[in-house]
Every structure is written in C-alpha cells, then in structure tokens.
Image: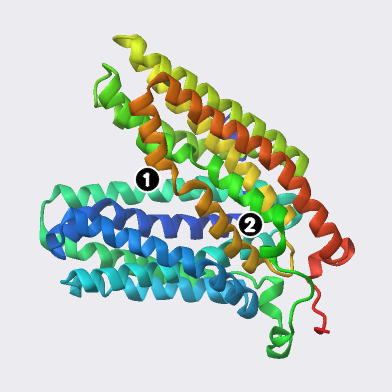
C-alpha cells in the first residue's frame, strides 16, 4: 500500500522532478518574502498601507504593458536563457530592498520586479512546453504545481516564524534570504537541458518567423480572455468567500485559517488526480466543464449560508471552499493542455506574453465586481457571479476550436511542429 502511495506522487519523469525542484525553490523564496512583505514595507521602508497598494497597482500596470514584448524576447533569445536571466535579475533586485527608504524608490523597485518577473513567466511557460514530451506535459505540470504549493507553504511558514520574532533585524533579512534562494534557482535553471529554441544560432535568431502572430489569432486571444474569467475562482477563494464569512454569516473567523489550509492541502495532493486523462483540447474542455460545475456549486452552497446557523454554516462554508478549489484544480489541468495545443510552437514566448495581456483583462475587474455583487446583492449576486463563469465557459468552448482552426491554417505542418522550423521571411 505504501509503495502504491509513493508511486502516485512520483514525478512522471526525472526532468519533471528537476522542474518541480525549481518550482519549489521559486515558491520558497517568493512565499517567504510575500508573507512578511506588508510588515517589511510599512516598518522597514516606512510606507503607508495606501502607498503600498498604489505601488503594487502601478507595478501591475507595468507588468501588463511589458508582457508581450517580454514574450517576444523569449522567442528571440531562448526560454532557458531568459528564464535564468529573470531569476538572477530578481535575486539582484531583492538585495536592493533593504536600502529603499522612499515611495519613489519603492515604486521603481516594484516596477522593475514585475517587468523582470514578466520575462521569467513567459520564459518558464515556453520552456516547459518546449522541453517536455507531449504525452507528459499535463501530468508533469500537475506535479510541478504540487511542488509549487509545497514551496509556498514552506515559505509562508518561514515568513510567519520571522514575523513572530517581531524584530526589524530579522525582517531586513527576508529579502536577503529570498535573493539567496533565487540565486540557487537561477543555477538550477542553467543546469536544465536546453529546449529547442535555446539551441538556435545567432543567425537563426535573426530570421523573421513566418505567419501571423498571436495578436491576430482571435481564437487564442478570446480563449485566454475566457480563461482569465474562469481564473476569477481565485477571487472567490481569497477574497469574496472570506468577506462573506465575516460579514454575512455567523461562522467564527478562525474558520478562515482552516479554509486556506484545506485549499493548500488539496493543491498539494490532488493536481495529478485532476490532470489524469487530460491530453488534448477535447479532454481539456471536458475538464473546463467539471471546473465550471464546481464553481457554480460553490456559489450555490455559499449563498445558502446566509440563512444557516451554527455548525451548518461552518460545514457549508467549508464545502463552498472545497468546491471552488476543485474548480481551480480542473482549470489548472485544462489550462496546461490549452497552452500546449493552441500555441504556435514557433512563437511560444510571444503567445505566452499575449495570453498575459488578454488573461489579465479577463480577471482584473473581478475583485471589485464580485465583492459588490456578493455583499450588496446577496443571493442574487452569487447567481450573477455563477452566470458570468458559465458564459465564459461556453465562450471558451467556441474560441478554443477557433484557435485550433487558426493553427491548422497558419501553424507549422503537424510533422514539423515539434521541430519549430524557421524559414526566411519573404
């Protein structure tokens, strides 16, 4: 029995195991700093809460603007190289945080971090699709997702321990710790095998790629927009359900810790189970339907807790959180398949950057709207939230097929897709 259990959580391949180690390193460093960041920025940098929020908003806009050009850089210079540069760049920037003592410096640093992070995000996505065999991509990404959540959990634990000491000296050490982890991460990335795009010569990198880019692929841009809408399950998970619990139910606030703990455990142990059987667009769309059902059920369960009391409320709020986590797990698995199947393999970095643009547009409005609908409209608001996601799911079913047809017309020949051929521009 124990051998079977261990086999269930074994990486699909040695390469997937190495990529999972990288995911854990990244999340460990990021999670440690994020846990203490609010206190660091207010007590060490000396900012107000409003200044912290404004700086993050400005940085978010910068990341949005940088996403597409960063993706094009990935295609030009290779994903592994850009990924390592991003990790090393972020490590260097973290060492600067202890010396920032003004709002202007904070904004400049936050913008730089987001722009460099945009490069890493596009490179990571392009590299993993490029280097993993087609029949292992989804399960490998699921294993890496589990490792990512382990890393964030460990990071949150370390950050929490640092905060418990209530010492500015320890707080000032947080960015140094994260910088060290990111340096190790950069070295680990460089030790990974090259993807096909990394092996191109300088002359090949100068050749203009044939065919239209992702901004002209209406199916891809629409699909990633709808996926952004579906990813608003995170808004329910992290914002709306907690606010609903506090303001509209009689559940004890300590339940919030249990809810987030449940989500963490599920996201560590269940991604590979959710990803099993997803291998193409058709099976990914089936997972989208599962995700949508879980999302709607979560809305229905949560709206009902307005009129329940005692243990009934506690159990139902917990079930609402479990079902929205189910929506997250199936959506994650489907998203990895869409990335692998619907992107032009010659332009994976560019497609990743374009996806960040449209995906952001699909989800950026959700915190304000969902909070208003749930808190101000009550039960009716939850039904509207559910309807929004159902419409997005239906739209994704159509747009994914449109993206498939676009790739059939303008992408490389099927037998050459894995080789990402380059041709001279005419």
Instruction: Examine the rendered structure and indicate whether residue 398 appears above or below residue 23.
Output: above
The residue furthest bottom is: 203
Query: Which residue is found at the position 34% from the left and 9% from the top?
Result: 308
Coordinates of residue 355 in the picture (x, y in percent): 59, 58
- Pointer 1 with pointer 2, Cβ within 8 A: no
Q: Secondary structure at mark 1?
A: helix
Measuring 52% from the left and 28% from the top, which residue is drawn there? 386
Q: SS at mark 2? A: helix
Q: Could you say which disc has been placed on residue 368 in the image?
A: none
x and y, in percent, of residue 221 in the image = 65, 55
Residue 264: quarter of image: top left
Viewer-nearest residue: 76 or 375: 375
Image quadrant containing the N terminus: top right
The mark that comes first in sequence, 1 or 2, is 2
The residue drawn where x is 71% and y is 68% is 213
Q: Name the residue beneath numbered marker 1.
A: 153
Residue that badge 2 annotates: 14
Front-most of residues 6 and 319? 319
């Amino acid at each position: 029995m124990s051998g079977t259990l261990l086999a269930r959580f074994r990486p699909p391949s040695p390469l997937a195991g190495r990529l999972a180690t990288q995911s854990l390193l990244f999340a460990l460093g990021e999670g440690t700093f994020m846990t203490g960041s609010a206190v660091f920025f207010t007590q060490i940098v000396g900012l107000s809460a409003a200044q912290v929020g404004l700086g993050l908003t400005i940085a978010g806009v910068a990341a949005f603007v940088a996403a597409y050009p960063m993706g094009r850089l990935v295609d030009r210079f290779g994903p592994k190289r850009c990924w390592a540069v991003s990790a090393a760049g972020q490590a260097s920037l973290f060492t600067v945080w202890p010396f920032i003592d003004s709002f202007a410096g904070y904004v400049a640093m936050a913008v730089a971090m987001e722009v460099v992070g945009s490069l890493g995000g596009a490179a990571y996505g392009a590299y993993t699709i490029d280097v993993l065999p087609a029949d292992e991509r989804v399960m490998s990404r699921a294993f890496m997702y589990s490792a990512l959540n382990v890393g964030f959990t460990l990071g949150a634990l370390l950050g929490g321990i640092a905060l418990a000491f209530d010492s500015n000296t320890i707080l000032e050490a947080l960015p140094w710790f994260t910088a060290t982890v990111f340096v190790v991460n950069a070295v680990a990335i460089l030790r990974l095998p090259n993807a096909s795009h990394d092996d191109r010569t300088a002359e090949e990198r100068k050749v203009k790629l044939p065919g239209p880019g992702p901004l002209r692929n209406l199916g891809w841009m629409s699909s990633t927009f709808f996926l952004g809408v579906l990813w608003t399950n995170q808004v329910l998970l992290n914002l709306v359900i907690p606010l609903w619990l506090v303001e509209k139910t009689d559940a004890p606030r300590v339940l919030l810790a249990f809810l987030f703990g449940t989500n963490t455990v599920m996201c560590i142990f269940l991604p590979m189970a959710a990803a099993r059987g997803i291998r193409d667009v058709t099976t990914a769309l089936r997972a989208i339907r599962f995700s949508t059902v879980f999302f709607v059920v979560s809305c229905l369960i949560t709206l009902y807790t307005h009129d329940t009391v005692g243990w009934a409320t506690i159990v139902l709020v917990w079930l609402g959180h479990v079902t929205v986590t189910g929506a997250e797990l199936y959506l994650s698995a489907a998203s990895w398949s869409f990335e692998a199947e619907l992107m032009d393999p010659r332009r994976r970095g560019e497609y990743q950057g374009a996806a960040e643009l449209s995906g952001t547009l699909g989800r950026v409005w959700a915190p304000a709207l969902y909070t208003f609908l749930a808190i101000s409209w009550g039960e009716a608001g939850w039904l509207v939230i559910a309807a929004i996601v159902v419409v997005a799911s239906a739209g994704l079913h159509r747009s994914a097929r449109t993206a498939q047809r676009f790739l059939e017309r303008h992408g490389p020949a099927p037998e050459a897709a894995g080789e990402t051929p380059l041709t001279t521009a005419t």
